[in-house]
């Protein structure tokens, strides 16, 4: 109906995306319910083309009048914007015709009472670890089910349901040198794959405890080992730098780098959007283009960019099915048998980074510098916690100096990597 | 006028009358609850962008809904609906009150709450303040100024965004308060190239007004020139130093230091829960003598200002730190009540689909008496940081970072070479005790700040005079 209305307003091509979300989120703090939130969101987004001119509009109000108004707004805008020879719907031959069930929909029958009990159990397990765990920011349980639907005026119609459930806990421990807070979480499309409640509570407590009485270290060059959650951001910067937008705007430190050796020769990074049940999976992208598994880095060399149909046309290439971004970017562990303890002993003496704060990544130049906290490591053993330091370098250089990728792969996000050991970075402290 | 506009926009389309509101209040907030509110919101906003010299895309968005919050002790039940009708509200109310013990159905009369006497901004819709052709002209002007400024400029990306939020807050006690909030913003990013080196610069501004804000005094052109200046400066920048040194922070946007280092730590929720490094420290010295910091939601037309906050409380100027001593926290109604005090007009939420929390408005340090030139001349060796990107804080340990995007070395009291962007890291509860000089040049930022907390973004302002800080850790790559 909305496509027809936009056509009636004079649009030559139209794309509409509809999403609806239903969810429940509870937070328990110090054993009592703090918040109980019922979520119900919906949104309709529309892109109208008048020839090569484009206008977009969206609404959360689904009344017939609001939907009509939204279509008219997109058309009004498209009458004013200037034509762009690269604008338009994707090539219909690139769009998905049929798709496999990616097992993304696992509703969790978890009424509020049960979610509250579970959150209480998570938090209680954390408090039981040590009397120094004296405060809490709460334990949370959330479940959400989403319906995504996409249609366009050249005949694409597709939709799928997906779920995402999570449990988390943030605890505060007190030591001689003040308080430290840390957290733990699990998230999955399938509630059966969430970690045990007790494990999440205990991990949050242990993480807060081990940070107590942290100090600074001296300013120096040293090896840096990133735990998987932090290593993820190094790979995230890589994905942004090879995205079509950063390439055609010439605002990437990896400009025109396809075919170049960006990482050490043993490194492999793949994208696998069709991985069943994974958090980044989708059968088609934000334009209805089919998604497919491919290599981004093979033997250290950049194979391809991350493109939607607009950026592909700008660069004279074909879309890679990445409207909406890269999906399930996976770094292959190397050498395969090493986890965090082995990488610590490979590092010898250096910094283990478990937390970073602040921005500090310049995608145009690759300059990288962020606030960090973690542990000082001596002879492969954790010596003491550190905080109030920064780590810096240039990403081009950091990527080339990766010495190993652990097999402790973190599956809780769209980027899947193990710990990453970098030969040397600048640490600033005292 | 604002009241009737809010009723027309929010209540009338769904046929919601005062009697209907009274019945929702009666059914939702009976015995067993300690208050709460219904928050009605209609937001319309647009964004236009220019790239390659052409305005090729623009968008328009509307968001409408009502959020109902029921409070019982320190527990909150919350549900929302994107349909504003009596049945939808009754259902959301029933869901939200499931946290409270069984109550009694009654009726609460709806009556006007306390409104601000002189509005801080006009209710006019920015979207209609310029016609479409002139919005495009404004972006093209910005692009032309940037490209004409220097031949090394290779890419210019500009954006113009505006919106209006129509808000109606109905408290559990039946008080009805409305606000209509315009907000505009322009931004420009340029790339410059020289000898194979490529660097960027950006600038922008805005506030609670119409688009005329950008044509007055040619602010759009000034942002473009500023972005070019920064990009060219970055082409010359050398690697930043690494280590602990003396620092001088410039006036205005560097006030993001205050926002991160102490602002979040003084929000009432973290202090009631005892998770802030500042908890229980009212009356203690937390900053050097001479330092006074306020949060002020009442500055006319500023990005962080509000006539009333998102709980319907009139905003105010709140003294946070006075002459170095911690004086007070920022509160919303829930945390104010649970802490035995009152709301300071800092209850804010991203939208009807989010719960309110204590949040900053415009946070700034009052000026001192020292000439900024004298402050620079007093430093033998250090870093002079005049512009920043964003920052982040861990309120429990107190550690914060904020990233300098324009900085220079100070050598023998003189500002010398520009250095590349680098983060500064410190400890909130002690960084202000290391301030040794306070400038007489208080400035507020140009209107670009958005603060994120628990996933909710709200517009804020910051400001400060030039400050000398003895001992800042700078995260560059060169041994100092």
Image: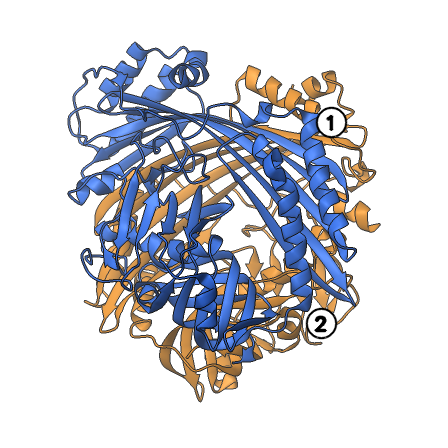
Chain colours: A orange, B blue
How far across and down, in percent of the image, does residue B282 sit? Answer: 19, 55
* Residue under label 1: A80
Instruction: Report the Cα–Cα distance between label 1 and label 2.
Output: 46 Å
- What residue occupies the far bottom of the structure in this picture? A379
Left or right of B476 on screen, residue A394 = right
| Rendered residue at 67%/33% (across/down) | B58
Q: Which image quadrant is residue A271 in?
A: bottom right
Q: Say if A260 sits above or below B297 in the image.
A: below
How far across and down, in percent of the image, does residue B340 sit? Answer: 15, 43
| Rendered residue at 51%/73% (across/down) | A391
Q: Dividing the image into 4 quarters, which one contains the C terminus of chain A? A: bottom left
The answer to whether residue B122 shows anywhere in this view is yes
User: Along the line of sight, which residue is nearer the eye, A104 or B475?
Assistant: B475
Asked which secondary structure carries label 1, the reply is helix
Q: How many marks?
A: 2
Q: Dividing the image into 4 quarters, which one contains the N terminus of chain A? A: top right
| Rendered residue at 36%/41% (across/down) | A25
User: Along the line of sight, which residue is nearer the eye, A140 or A258?
Assistant: A258
Left or right of B404 on screen, residue A178 = left
User: Along the line of sight, which residue is nearer the eye, A402 or A369?
Assistant: A369
The answer to whether residue A157 shows anywhere in this view is no
* Residue under label 2: A300
How far across and down, in percent of the image, does residue B41 sit? Answer: 42, 26
Sequence-wise, which precedes: disc 1 or disc 2?
1
Chain letter of the residue carrying label 2: A
Asked which secondary structure carries label 2, the reply is loop
Q: Which image quadrant is residue B94 in?
A: top left
**Image depth: mark 1 or mark 2 in front:** 1
Q: Say if B113 sits above or below A118 in the image.
A: above
């Amino acid at each position: 109906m909305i496509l027809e209305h936009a056509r009636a307003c004079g649009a030559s091509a139209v794309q509409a995306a509809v999403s609806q979300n239903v969810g429940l989120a509870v937070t328990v703090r110090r054993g009592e319910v703090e918040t109980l939130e019922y979520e119900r969101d919906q949104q309709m987004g529309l892109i109208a083309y008048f020839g090569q001119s484009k206008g977009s509009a969206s609404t959360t109000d689904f009344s017939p009048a609001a939907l009509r108004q939204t279509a008219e707004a997109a058309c009004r805008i498209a009458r004013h914007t200037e034509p762009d020879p690269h604008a338009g719907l994707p090539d219909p031959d690139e769009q998905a015709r049929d798709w496999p069930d990616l097992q993304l929909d696992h509703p969790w029958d978890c009424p509020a009472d049960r979610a509250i009990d579970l959150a209480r159990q998570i938090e209680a397990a954390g408090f039981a670890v040590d009397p120094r765990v004296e405060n809490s920011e709460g334990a949370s349980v959330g479940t959400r089910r989403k319906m995504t639907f996409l249609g366009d005026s050249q005949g694409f119609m597709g939709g799928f349901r997906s779920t995402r459930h999570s449990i988390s806990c943030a605890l505060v421990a007190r030591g001689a040198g003040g308080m430290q807070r840390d957290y733990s979480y699990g998230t999955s499309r399938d509630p059966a794959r969430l970690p045990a409640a007790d494990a999440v509570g205990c991990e949050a407590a242990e993480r807060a405890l081990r940070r107590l009485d942290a100090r600074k270290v001296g300013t120096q060059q040293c090896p840096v080992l990133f735990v998987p959650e932090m290593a993820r951001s190094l790979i995230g910067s890589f994905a942004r730098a090879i995205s079509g937008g950063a390439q055609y705007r010439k605002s990437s430190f990896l400009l025109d780098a396809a075919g170049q050796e960006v990482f050490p020769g043993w490194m492999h990074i793949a994208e696998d959007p069709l991985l069943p049940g994974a958090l980044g999976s989708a059968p088609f992208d934000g334009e209805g283009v089919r998604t497919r598994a491919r290599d981004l880095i093979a033997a250290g060399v950049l194979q391809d960019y991350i493109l939607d149909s607009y950026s592909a046309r700008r660069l004279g290439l074909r879309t890679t099915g990445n409207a909406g971004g890269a999906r399930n970017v996976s770094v292959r562990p190397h050498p395969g048998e090493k986890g965090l303890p082995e990488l610590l002993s490979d590092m010898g003496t250096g910094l283990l980074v478990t937390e970073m704060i602040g921005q500090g990544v310049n995608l145009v130049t690759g300059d990288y510098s962020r606030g960090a906290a973690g542990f000082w490591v001596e002879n492969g053993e954790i010596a003491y916690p550190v905080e109030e330091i920064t780590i810096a370098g240039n990403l081009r250089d950091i990527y080339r100096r990766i010495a190993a990728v652990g097999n402790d792969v973190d599956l809780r996000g769209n980027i899947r990597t193990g710990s990453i050991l970098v030969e040397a970075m600048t640490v600033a402290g005292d | 006028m604002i009241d009737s506009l809010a009723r027309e926009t929010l209540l009338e389309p769904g046929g919601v009358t005062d009697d209907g509101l009274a019945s929702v209040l009666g059914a939702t907030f009976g015995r067993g609850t300690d208050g709460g509110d219904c928050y009605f919101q209609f937001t319309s906003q647009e964004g236009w962008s220019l790239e390659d010299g052409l305005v090729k895309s623009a968008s328009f968005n509307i968001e409408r809904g009502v959020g109902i919050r029921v409070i019982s002790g320190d527990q909150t039940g919350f549900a929302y609906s994107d349909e504003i009708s009596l049945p939808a509200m009754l259902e959301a109310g029933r869901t939200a009150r499931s946290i409270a013990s069984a109550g009694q159905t009654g009726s609460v009369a709806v009556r006007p709450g306390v409104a601000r006497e002189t509005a801080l901004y006009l209710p006019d819709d920015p979207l209609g303040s310029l016609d479409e052709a002139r919005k495009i002209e404004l972006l093209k002007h910005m692009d032309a100024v940037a490209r004409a400024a220097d031949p090394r400029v290779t890419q210019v990306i500009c954006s113009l965004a505006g919106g209006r939020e129509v808000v109606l807050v109905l408290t559990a006690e039946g008080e009805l308060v409305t606000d209509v909030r315009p907000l505009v913003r322009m931004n420009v990013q340029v790339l410059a190239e020289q000898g194979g080196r490529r660097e960027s610069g950006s600038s922008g501004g805005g506030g609670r007004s119409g688009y005329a804000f950008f044509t007055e005094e040619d602010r759009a052109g000034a942002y473009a020139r500023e972005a070019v200046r920064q990009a060219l400066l970055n082409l010359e920048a050398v690697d930043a130093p690494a280590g602990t040194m003396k620092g001088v922070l410039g006036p205005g946007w560097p006030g993001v230091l205050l926002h991160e280092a102490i602002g979040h730590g003084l929000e009432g929720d973290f202090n009631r829960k005892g998770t802030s490094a500042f908890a229980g420290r009212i009356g203690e010295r937390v900053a050097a003598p001479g330092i006074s910091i306020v949060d002020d939601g009442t500055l006319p037309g500023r990005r962080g200002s509000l006539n009333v906050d998102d709980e319907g409380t009139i905003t105010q100027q709140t003294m946070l730190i006075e002459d170095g001593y911690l004086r007070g926290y920022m509160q919303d109604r829930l945390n104010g009540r649970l802490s035995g005090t009152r709301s300071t007009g800092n209850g804010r939420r991203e939208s009807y689909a989010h719960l309110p929390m204590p949040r900053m408005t415009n946070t700034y340090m009052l000026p001192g008496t020292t000439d900024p030139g004298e402050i620079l001349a007093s430093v033998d060796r250090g870093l002079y940081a005049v512009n920043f990107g964003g920052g982040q804080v861990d309120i429990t340990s107190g550690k914060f970072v904020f990233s300098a995007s324009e900085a220079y070395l100070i050598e023998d009291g003189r500002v010398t070479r520009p250095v590349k962007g680098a983060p500064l890291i410190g400890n909130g509860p002690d960084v202000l005790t290391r301030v040794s000089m306070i400038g007489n040049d208080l400035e507020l930022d140009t209107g670009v700040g958005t603060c994120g907390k628990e996933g909710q973004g709200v517009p804020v302002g910051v400001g400060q005079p030039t400050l000398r800080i003895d001992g800042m850790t700078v995260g560059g790559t060169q041994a100092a």
